[in-house]
Image (cartoon, rainbow, N blue to C red):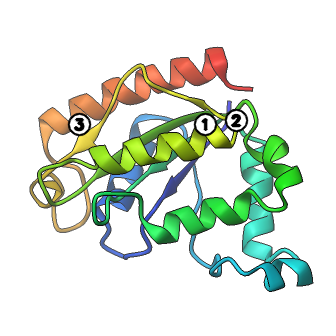
């Protein structure tokens, strides 16, 4: 069972990339990246799908599940992450191949108190539009992220580790039952 996992941040010391790597220690994830995906431009699309987009589309199309690890910017989803998903949905005739019936989980970390709740809620509108099967059986919203990771990026907070383990266990079971 393949689950592709994406961090919605390009920062080298991103809390969400740290959370993604912590999740990959708990569950077998195919860790991918949105790095190298250009800003969406219909003229670029008309000239040919950029290689990083085509490669990521194929990985997701072959997967049974997708884990989005999302930051929260200004109370919503991050532009760079939304841009990547927009590219992956192009052309629109590919939406079914790439996303249709795909089990999707969304988790996130933020240095603030909200734990990415607003960003995760905003993703639900996008995921429904793409004909995915969102996972609602558990949630993971990590607040005060600067206190739960060490300087090397390792998740060191026992309570958050436990919550991550429970989330991933439930998400894996969901993907096994409901993913394509």
State the image coordinates of residue 160 (x, y, percent, origin top left). 19, 38
Can residue 140 be seen here? The reply is yes
Drawn side of residue 117 relative to residue 137, left or right: left
> Mark 2 and 1 residues: CB-CB less than 8 Å, in contact?
yes
In this rendering, the answer to whether 133 lies above or below 4 is above
In this rendering, the answer to whether 118 lies above or below 72 is above
**For the residues marked 1 and 3, what is the alpha-carbon distance in whole angstroms?**
29 Å
Q: Which residue is mark 2?
A: 131
Foreground label between 1 and 3: 1
Q: Which residue is mark 1?
A: 128
Q: Residues within 10 Å of mark 2 (few under 14, many from 20)?
A: some
In this rendering, the answer to whether 42 lies above or below 138 is below
Give the quadrant of residue 46.
bottom right
Give the quadrant of residue 87.
bottom right
Q: Which residue is mark 3?
A: 161
Element under disc 2: loop
State the image coordinates of residue 164 (x, y, percent, origin top left). 30, 34
State the image coordinates of residue 11 (x, y, percent, origin top left). 37, 76
Drawn side of residue 71 relative to residue 172, left or right: left
Between 52 and 149, the one lying in front of the other is 52
The image quadrant where one finds the C terminus is top right
């Amino acid at each position: 069972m393949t689950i592709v996992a994406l961090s919605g941040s390009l920062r080298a010391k991103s809390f969400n990339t740290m959370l993604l790597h912590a999740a990959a220690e708990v569950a077998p994830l195919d860790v991918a990246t949105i790095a190298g995906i250009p800003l969406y431009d219909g003229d670029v699309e008309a000239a040919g799908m950029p290689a990083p987009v085509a490669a990521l589309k194929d990985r997701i199309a072959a997967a049974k599940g997708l884990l989005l690890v999302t930051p929260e910017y200004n109370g919503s989803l991050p532009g760079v992450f939304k841009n990547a998903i927009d590219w992956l949905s192009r052309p629109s005739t590919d939406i079914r191949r790439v996303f249709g019936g795909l089990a999707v989980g969304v988790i996130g970390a933020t240095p603030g108190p909200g734990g990415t709740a607003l960003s995760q809620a905003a993703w639900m509108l996008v995921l429904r539009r793409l004909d995915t099967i969102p996972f609602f059986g558990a949630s993971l919203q990590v607040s005060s992220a600067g206190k739960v990771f060490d300087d090397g990026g390792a998740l060191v907070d026992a309570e958050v580790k436990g919550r991550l383990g429970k989330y991933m266990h439930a998400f894996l079971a969901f993907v096994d039952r409901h993913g394509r």
